Amino acid sequence: MKKINLLGATGSIGTQTLDIIREHPSEFRVTAISVGKNIDLARKFIVEFQPELVSVQDYQDCHTLKAEFPNIKFTFGQEGLIEAAVYEKADILVNAVIGSVGLNPTLQAIESGKIIAIANKETLVTAGHLVIDAAKRNNVPLLPVDSEHSAIFQALQGEKEKNIERLILTASGGSFRDRTRQELKNVTVEQALNHPNWSMGAKITIDSASMMNKGLEVIEAHWLFNMPYEKIDVLLHKESIIHSMVEFHDSSIIAQLGTPDMRVPIQFALTYPDRLALPTSKRLDLASIGKLHFQEMDVARFRCLGFAYEAGKKGGSMPTVLNAANEVAVAAFLAGKIHFLQIEDLIEKALTTHQIVDHPSLAAIQEIDTETRDYVRSLL
């Protein structure tokens, strides 16, 4: 039985992770969870899964739950998140929180020797060099949970890095893939959250609509697979059936296919190198689908993707600025403070005003992250 610490249990990836654990009670056990502010759902998970440690965001919620569940240890805040990540009885950390808040808990869990199943792409975007160095130093596997990176990871099983020609990440195009830039000027939050293929949290869905999500995934792929940006391409694929591909020197391409179901890559990360049945997942029927469609990505149309390539290639602290500016801008859009296209404007201003710091330390990254957020908020 594998024991799991789960950060972000009440989010989209977190709840689907718990679906898998529920389906395979003899294979997995939850030892620690973090739940943010969704305390009603947290109560249900505590009763069902009986974790030994629970971290919440606020002290008052921590105090309330302690009184209700006296046999469980509760903690809160950033320190609580770290405590849940490193809880000693677990084998695996599933990091499913949203944003750069997941960075420090991941680094601490690596130092404690946990296997890392990583769905928190901002951790690698913000400080990829620190995460990869720590994982190598501690001989800790980083298992991707994103469907695109899981697809590449699966396609590379048994292959040699020297034979890779390029990685091809597929992109659905998000909620506005068929709209021109002119048509994006007055789109609403509700329209942006209406993703055609995937059921995801609000922040990721907005990132998908702006194509920042794919940009972050390009940077993540750079670190996970030790691949230069010149060898990472993005292809628009509206059906989300091919989740990503690897092309080799001999012109062979290996793709991983499946219906759009995040439980598949989550479960593969939990069971690797083995696989378990997932009877509740819809089987892929290519005959009924009939056709798959592909288009080149237009970085003039999807400017955030271009920003991500630019930030990744410049390296150093630029991806930290990219991510921090995007998080603030997306939050402002969701709150109705800016229009959709202003997300791009705010990110661009943050990138153009930043002075790059090469090989930043964790302290420098945290300082730059804070400064960037303050700067973008000053523009609102």
Image: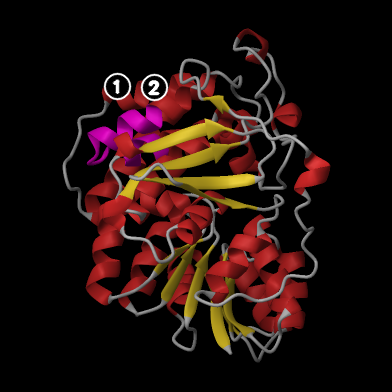
96 displayed left or right of 160: right
Q: How many marks?
A: 2
Relative horizontal placement of residue 324, taking residue 45 as reference (left or right): left
Q: Residues within 10 Å of mark 2 (few under 14, many from 20)?
A: some
Q: Which residue is mark 1?
A: 352
- Up the image or down, 250 lies above or below 72; here it is above
Q: Determine if residue 173 is in view.
A: yes
What is the secondary structure assignment of the residue under circle 1? helix
**Circle 2 residue:** 348
Magenta-colored span: 307-323
Are the residues flagged by discs 2 and 1 in contact, CB closer than 8 Å?
yes
Q: Position of residue 359 (x, y in %)?
A: 17, 47
Q: Nearer the viewer, residue 331 or 135?
A: 135
In this picture, residue 25 sits left or right of residue 273: right
User: Looking at the magenta stretch, what is its main secondary structure?
Assistant: helix
At x 20%, y 30%, the residue is 355
